Image: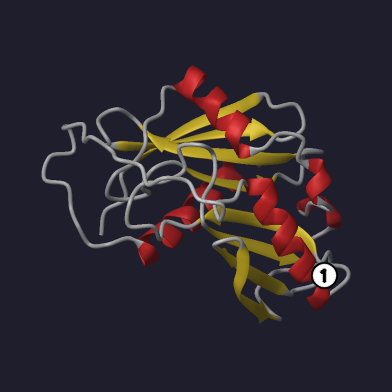
Amino acid sequence: MKKVFLFLFICVFLVSCQQNTDQNTVEDSTVVSKVTFSPNTEMDLTLKEALEIAHKEALKWNKKAMLYSGTSVDKDKMPTGMEGKRKHWNIVFGIPDKTDYYLVTIRNGKVSDKAHSPNEFKPMSKNHFISSVEEFKYDTPELLKKAKKVTKIYPGDTFAKGYNFGFTKDPEKSFPFVMIIGWDQAKKNMIYSMFNAVTGDLEEVSEREQYKN
């Protein structure tokens, strides 16, 4: 079950990146590019900071709204995320046993968009969802540091630029996962490191060949 949810998460993340990335291509994927990070600003958010903003907005829509999944979005022209923060986030909410899907888009520290789709989900039990941000004991800055040590990930340059982040929930587990997303040194494979959001332990590492049009 965990592998199924990891695959679904990867698919959603790749679609988000593809919708927002430029159309530049890498002539030789075996060449390691020098990545220049844009400086962090006060509008960059960690995962937990983005979740807090998005959850408050979702509760205005429905008091029973619960966190389902989400990712940072690859909209910056320059690679970012070196410190575990991003400017752009898509956070998805749902309601146990209902079909509602509620998307909150965060940009530069604020809610920039929101969308309600009443028939997007199949009804799912409560254990598919995350009740509150407090379940995340570890945040993206410290987990990025861990990922660099144990998986040797590198920042992307033309697609999924910099480091990206996300979260999901396996209904068979009692905790959410935080995803740290980077690349191998050759920029050929994307590396997805799944951490236990409660203990900070690395649960799984997966690689996927670079997404191509």
Q: Residue 129: which quarter of the image?
A: bottom right
Quick check: 97 above or below 40? below
Residue sitting at x 41%, y 22%: 152
Residue sitting at x 19%, y 57%: 24
Quick check: 95 above or below 37? below
Circle 1 Cα neighbour tier, 10 Å, few/some/many (<14 / 14–19 / ≥20) = few
Q: Residue 32: which quarter of the image?
A: top left
* Closest to the observer, 110 or 27: 110
- In the picture, measured across the screen, residue 170 lies left or right of residue 25, that is right
Residue 166 in percent (x, y) is at 58, 47
Q: Residue 207: which quarter of the image?
A: top left
* Closest to the observer, 85 or 154: 85
Instruction: Point out the residue furthest to the top here.
Output: 149
Residue 60 in percent (x, y) is at 81, 75
Quadrant holding the C terminus: bottom left
- In the picture, measured across the screen, residue 138 lies left or right of residue 152, that is right
**Label 1 sits on residue:** 59
Q: Is residue 2 visible?
A: no
Residue sitting at x 71%, y 57%: 68
Residue 86 in percent (x, y) is at 51, 50
